[in-house]
Image: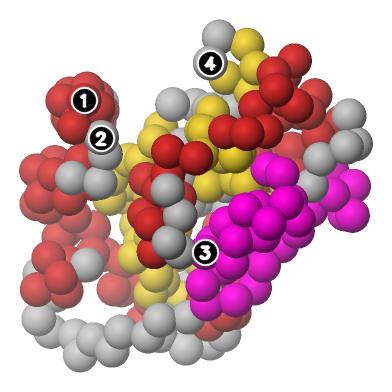
Amino acid sequence: MPQLIASLPEYQHELVRVNRARGMQMLRDPSFTCDPALIWNKERAQWVAFSITSFRVLSNGLAIRRADREQIAHFIHDGKVDLHGLLDSGKELIGVVAERSYGQQLDNLLQQVAPQQIRAHYGNDALGSLLQMQRLGRLQLLLGYWPEIRYQAVQQGMDPQDLEFYPVEGTSKYQEIHVGCSDTPQGRKAITRINQALLKLREERLVELYAAWLDPGMRDEYRADARAYFQDLKDH
């Protein structure tokens, strides 16, 4: 965010921290609002102006308490979880951040789940609250990004070693992140400038910023994959 702001000196920037649901409402309003980290999906594309890909992240997956592993072992295959089958069993509650997109594949899956199985949290510290609910046994499953879940667990005074994380079968390894602005003349004009800035920032600075959140053993693979992805965009 600081790098992108510095690249757009012609704008006066006001940073506002809100929960995901409020952030989406601000983008829907006829105002001049931008969000630096959005996943594209068909619904949002109807009322959000999206930038080019700013960076890629490891996809959302499933976090559980290590102590609960045996309860879902039947649904784990080759290190990935059959989330559709697990939720279809109708036994487990899953926690999500309200109005967050988890990528088109997971969003579609969640739409098929019985509403009573989903615990959607609207708070400003939604993920932290969901982790506490999981710790207390009030929900078993939690969707999210593993680096974010680990960080929030520490903030909540929890040991990340007590959690396990599984990619979801049928989802891509990475998800593309975009800047999104209100789909207004001002917002669309800003996206044009943001795209120019991202072309200079994304391959080096933004890749390194995200890599720093990963386990050291994962960073080189992520860097190589990210740079290959952006090089492929140039070649086509």
Is 202 positioned to the left or the right of 89 in the image? left
Which numbered tag is attached to residue 217? 1
Asked which quadrant contains residue 129, the reply is bottom right
Q: Nearer the viewer, residue 228 or 147?
A: 147
Q: CA distance from mark 2 to mark 3?
A: 21 Å
Residue projecting furthest to the top = 78
Q: Residues within 10 Å of mark 2 (few under 14, many from 20)?
A: few
Which secondary structure, mark 3? helix
Which numbered tag is attached to residue 128? 3
In the rendering, at what x and y percent does residue 147 appear? Answer: 37, 45
Residue denoted by label 4: 79
- Proximity of marks 1 and 2: CB atoms separated by less than 8 Å: yes
Looking at marks 3 and 4 on the same chain, the residue that comes earlier in the sequence is marked by 4
Residue shown at the point (73%, 51%) measured from the top left: 137
Q: Quadrant of the N terminus?
A: bottom left
Say what amino acid the circle numbered 1 marks: Gly
Looking at marks 3 and 1 on the same chain, the residue that comes earlier in the sequence is marked by 3
In the rendering, at what x and y percent does residue 87 appear? Answer: 81, 34
